[in-house]
Amino acid sequence: MIRAMKASCPGSCGELFQCVVDGREFLMSYGIEKKSQVLIGPQTGVVGEELRPKMLRVINELTDQIDFDYTFQTDISVGKGYSSSTADMLSILGAYSAYKHGKVSVPLLTSLCSKIEPSDSVGFSDWTVMNPLNGEIQWQTRWKPKLYVYILEPDQMVDTTSFIRMTDSPKYPAEQSKKLLTDFKIACDQQNVQLLGAVATTSALLNNKRLPKPYLNDIIDIVNELGLLGVNVAHSGSVVGILLTEDQLMHMTELERRLAHHPLASYYSLRNLSKIIYDGLQVKKVEEIFE
């Protein structure tokens, strides 16, 4: 038996909201039931699946010597706005940090991810508003509402690193977006899920001027007709999320019926329900045999 460290980090379905305040970008991501996992242990000459390039680049921020064995697995799709890169990088950083140093700092590791590419707040177990470009934490809340998201995923992929930032895009209404942060804080302080849904939907519509999502207005119309919570998007990706409370799950059959009978069904061909989770980056010591 070989002592090892295992880390996992959830992906997200885009961002609950994203905005520009005083020339700086901020976003808030939530976790879903998809994750990246890395297992690190002493070298035995056996390794698992190849690490992705960004994982290798970010681990080089901590060490220039891969003197450990690892296995890596994930069920997060790449290039859709699922925070796959952040989840991948945080899982390798978390496992390595715990294995080598016996401690893990999510803020520090998130800031390291931001050196490689704009990152998300999926590593935090509390909802965290942060600057994706440097990992700076703007605000956190301990409110953890019991919510679900019906994920609409197209085949289309988006290269996050090559996409024009909100602060540089003449199409993005940055001044209008500033209020999203204030309203999000109010929603959390008041534990108001309706306002939370409104923040997400407004953020989606503002971003649609910069990165249009096919059928977004039709999706919002269906959500409003059924009285569901709201719609959020990947602001630099292609997925769309329909937000629901636990009580609203009773409308899932009708929701899927309406979506399936709409032309949007062929574009958003993959659709699945996920809980919104609050795991963040999880690290634990395990006894594993590398095979």
Image (cartoon, helix red, strand yellow):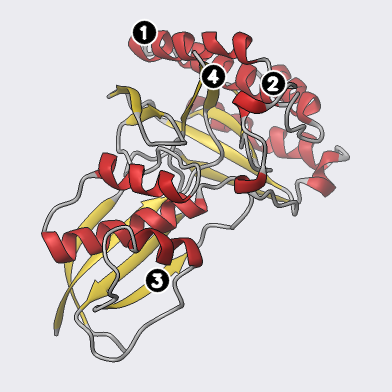
Q: Reading the chain from its start, which is encountered first: label 3 or label 2?
A: 3
C-alpha span from label 3 to label 1: 40 Å
Residue extending farthest to the right is 263
Q: Is residue 95 left or right of residue 15?
A: left
Are there few (<14), some (14-19), or many (20+) residues within 10 Å of tag 1?
A: few
Residue at x 71%, y 39% (from the top left corner): 256
Q: Which residue is mark 3?
A: 72
Q: Which mark is residue 253?
A: none
Q: Amino acid at mark 2?
A: Tyr
Q: Amino acid at mark 1?
A: Gln
Q: Reading the chain from its start, which is encountered first: label 3 or label 1?
A: 3
Q: Amino acid at mark 4?
A: Val
Q: Reading the chain from its start, which is encountered first: label 2 or label 1?
A: 2
x and y percentages locating residue 110 in the rendered image: 34, 44
C-alpha span from label 2 to label 1: 29 Å
Q: Which residue is mark 4?
A: 20
Q: Reading the chain from its start, which is encountered first: label 3 or label 4?
A: 4
Q: Which quadrant of the view contains residue 121?
A: top left
